[in-house]
Amino acid sequence: MIDLKLLQKEFESVSAKLTRKGVDATLIEELKVKNEELKVAKKAYEELQALQNAMSKEFGIYKREGKDIAELKAKVDANKVKIAEALETQRVKQEALESLAMAIPNMPDDSVADGADEDDNVEIKKVLTPKEFDFEVKEHWELAEKNGWIDFERGVKLATSRFSASFGMGARLERALINFMLDFNRSRGFEEVSVPALVNRKALEGTGQLPKFEDDLYKIDGQELFLIPTAEVPVTNLYQDEILSADELPKKMTAYTSCFRKEAGAAGRDTRGMIRQHQFHKVELVTIAKPDESEKIFNEMVECASDILTALELPHRLVNLCTGDLGFSASYTTDIEVWLPGQNTYREISSISNTKEFQARRAKIRYKNGKKNEFVHTLNGSSLAVGRTLVAIMENFQNEDGSIDIPKVLHPYLGMN
């Protein structure tokens, strides 16, 4: 959640940053109205409280001087009623502002470039050179079907569209990738954790998926439980409503989970193959850090995810997202896009974000900084999306006859010499 104290102090500056991120002007105006209503309510309460304090002092003087206190006592009692009413009004106005603020995205960092959409993202660098093929390359769904690795029709039969089933080497490769990624992340100092695939509403509010993106979540009927859209949700919320010691930080974690998304806003996009599935496997990186360490750790996380692709011999590029493509909770984000020769383009395979205090404020994750309790910074990123990595391997390691080579780094995980 955005800093409401900062909003009250520097409304114009905060609203300008929110405008850069594409927040609708009417929503910003509503935020301003509710902010002003809260300020008025606070002022009214403070004035009544000041009057109460003054009358209390006067009351003491009257008693010492033996004056009649009946009239003054009646005023004090009447003012107490007004104070209680003013306090309730302030509470209602505070809740209204906080409720609206829960639907307001994080402010973009000053370093983020202005832009409308992904076309305005800024490329940082390319890593590895795409292979030149001397035959017509196939897309991953053709290769998957030819090699018997993935069966899309049986996935649909078991569930609905955008589900698939893996067989043989396809299934083994998914497991090998998961283990390789977890081992790689552990070697970079990220502790492996295992978390539930179901979370409650509070957890999703903490990381920013709720209330705005409820339509994209799978909810358990009759319960306030949701299937996770990403391991970022349960891993970050492991420390929800806690005060950590400075010595505990940073907490660098990695987790493998299945993820579930309705893809409500992606109708008609990537309907064929494994690029956009309702259920997919992902290895995640999450860090809880002190504010002065978060930028350094962000760069470490980007490097870690990129180095996994390099180890897999997969060409990729790094891009900084512009304001129009930045996620709801992110202050700044670097996407990693892997080269897919079948599509002749780079496609997102990882998104590393620093949310700064935004998620920590929502989830109430703090740390002891001297005598003060301050909000931590939270960071998250894919390392990596398993299905998309498998897609990239199929397309980049294909042979003319449709067979697929296996990256050497995965051979030990598959019992290959």
Image: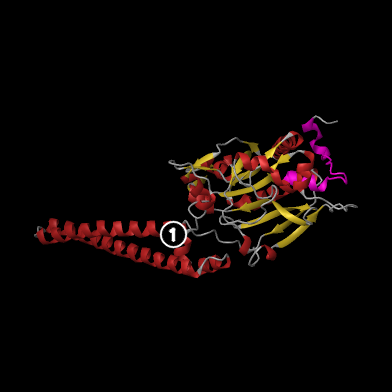
Residue 373 seen in the figure: no
Say which of 234 and 227 sits in front.
227
Residue type, mark 1 in image? Leu
Which residue appears at 78% of the width and 50% of the height? 139
Q: Position of residue 76 (x, y in %)?
A: 18, 59
- Relative side of 173 to 323, left or right: right
Splitting the image into 4 quarters, where does residue 253 fall?
top right
Q: Give the class, few, some or many, for how many residues have Cα within 10 Å of label 1's Cα (few <14, many ≥20).
A: some
Is residue 98 found left or right of 381 in the rendered image?
left
* Residue 350, horizontal then vertical, whole percent: 68, 50
User: Given the current orientation, which residue lies at the most extreme right position?
Assistant: 134
Q: Which residues are magenta?
A: 389-414
Magenta-span inclusion, residue 373: no
Instruction: Report which quarter residue 5 is drawn in.
Output: bottom left
**Residue shown at 56%/38% (left/top)?**
197
Whether the magenta-drawn stretch holds residue 411 is answered as yes
Mark 1 = which residue? 100
Q: Secondary structure at mark 1?
A: helix
